Image: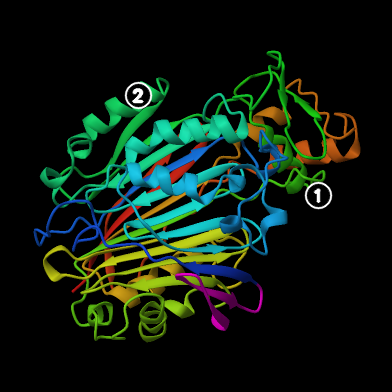
Amino acid sequence: MTGLSSSQKVGDAQHAVSVTDNTQAETMQLCTPTCSTNGTHSDGYTGAFEGPEKLLEMWFAPTCGAAICADPGAELCDEDQDQWSELRSGLRLVPRAVWRDMLDLVHCQVLSTLCNEHLDSYLLRQSSFFVYPHKLVLKTCGTTTLLYAIPRILDIARRYLGATGAYQVFYSRKNFMFPDQQEELHRSWEREVAYLDTHFPEGSAYMIGKTNRDHWHVYLCGPYEMPLSGAVDDDTTANNSAEGSPLVHALSRTSSRSTVHSLIESAGVGSPPGLHAPSDTTVEILMTGLDPDRMQAMYMGGASSLEGSLGGKAVERATGIASIYPDSASDSYLFTPCGFSLNGLQGDGYYTIHVTPEPHCSYASFETTVSGDSAIDLSSAAGVKSLVEQVTAVFGPRSVTVTVFRARGDTAAALAGSELSVEVDGVGKDSPVAKGALQSAATSGDNVPPAFAPVAGYKTVDRVLYEFDHYWLRYAYYAKAN
């Protein structure tokens, strides 16, 4: 559990350092005005708040090590200086003022930041924002206009990374409760897809689940090779790591650099320096019809009468949220008159929770990329089952949507049988390292997410396994059994 070890007043902001057994993270509480009583840019609260979030994930390189700043000599301003400054690279070197300007476009305000050696997280009045060196994740609720951020994000990546486009893009959301209250762009999935297609002509759109029940929309584009800076010929892709520019020679432009790194890691021989390719698995748990009794903690005067981070910590303790990832660093917020948000960091993964507790529009979301946790293994059916049961025990929802998105291993296995030449920091295709990696890929299967195990207290209404070109998706919809 995170504890506050020190606190001091810095100008008009409250500065605190959070310490856990494994992670030290810095939290900066910012004083930002409420734009309206329902936490969105709408004028006045209609009593029907849209909890289900819009989620945009944009990658500009396949790995952290492949993303470097176009201006490595640029100095951070005082606001951006912290204990992690020397470890930042890529998109993490973008000034916070630039990110706030981008967030203004979609009507989001930053409440606080939480950082570690791997990533920066921003807790927003309207959900969450996460920044890695090579990618970013923006999640917004209410009537925010998330997709309008895309042109500005592309401009920022071009300016600070030299990126000529996105490496891969994901956009997803659950079906809205009150679609007519959205701004015009977000009133229908068809309009959103048409807008996305103007920026990503090769993208693909899907609807997953039953049309007459809760369902999920997803839009995918890439991955494909987009050089960060400077031209490369059709048979090579540049590795823009700080250590130099070794090349990975492949048969196809659509083959990811991270494929070779994953092959080497899976063989147990380790990665070349600077080329670490972390696992790419995301689990989302989306819940409606929350238990009113349990949701009392999410109201001012329930678990706490203090708005902000102190009230958020009280909610974490009172509800059992703090025990889900007890070794993480967390940054949470209790809103007036109700509502709760949390960002958490553990290693190179994040998790985030957002709660709208009002009975007529109750909704909660839980998203995680935390891998390697001793208690919750996202690669196993038992681990996902344990996570879902812990989360549903906190909120007591009537209905639950679970998605598991995982990078496929078939590309790696296919390369193992191809005429592939690998050269990474002098590692050739005939070396024991490369041979072992390729053999491992050929026998490791396609990394299909395991089938969902039964969830205590719920009956399974719908289950779908989707096979995309580069990812697997497992989708399940559960309803309360009694």
Judge whether residue 2 is colored magenta.
yes
Mark 1 Cα-neighbour bin, 10 Å: few <14, some 14–19, many ≥20 = some
Identify the residue at image location x=40%, y=74%. 390
Residue 22 rendering spot, x and y as whole percentages:
66, 74
Pointer 1 residue: 270
Residue 197 marker: 2
Discs 2/1, front: 2
* Camera sees residue 49: yes
Judge whether residue 393 is colored magenta.
no
Left or right side of 171 for 227: right
Q: Circle 1 — which element? A: loop
Q: Nearer the viewer, residue 199 or 267?
A: 199
- Amino acid type at mark 2: Asp
Distance Cα–Cα, label 2 vs label 1: 39 Å
Give the quadrant of the N terminus: bottom right
Left or right side of 338 for 466: right
Identify the residue at image location x=68%, y=35%. 71
Residue 219 rendering spot, x and y as whole percentages:
37, 35
Q: Which residues are magenta?
A: 1-22
Q: Nearer the viewer, residue 387 or 79?
A: 79
Q: Identify whether 149 is placed above or below 114.
A: above
Main SS, magenta region, reads strand
Residue 233 rendering spot, x and y as whole percentages:
71, 13
Give the quadrant of the C terminus: bottom left
Q: Circle 2 — which element? A: helix
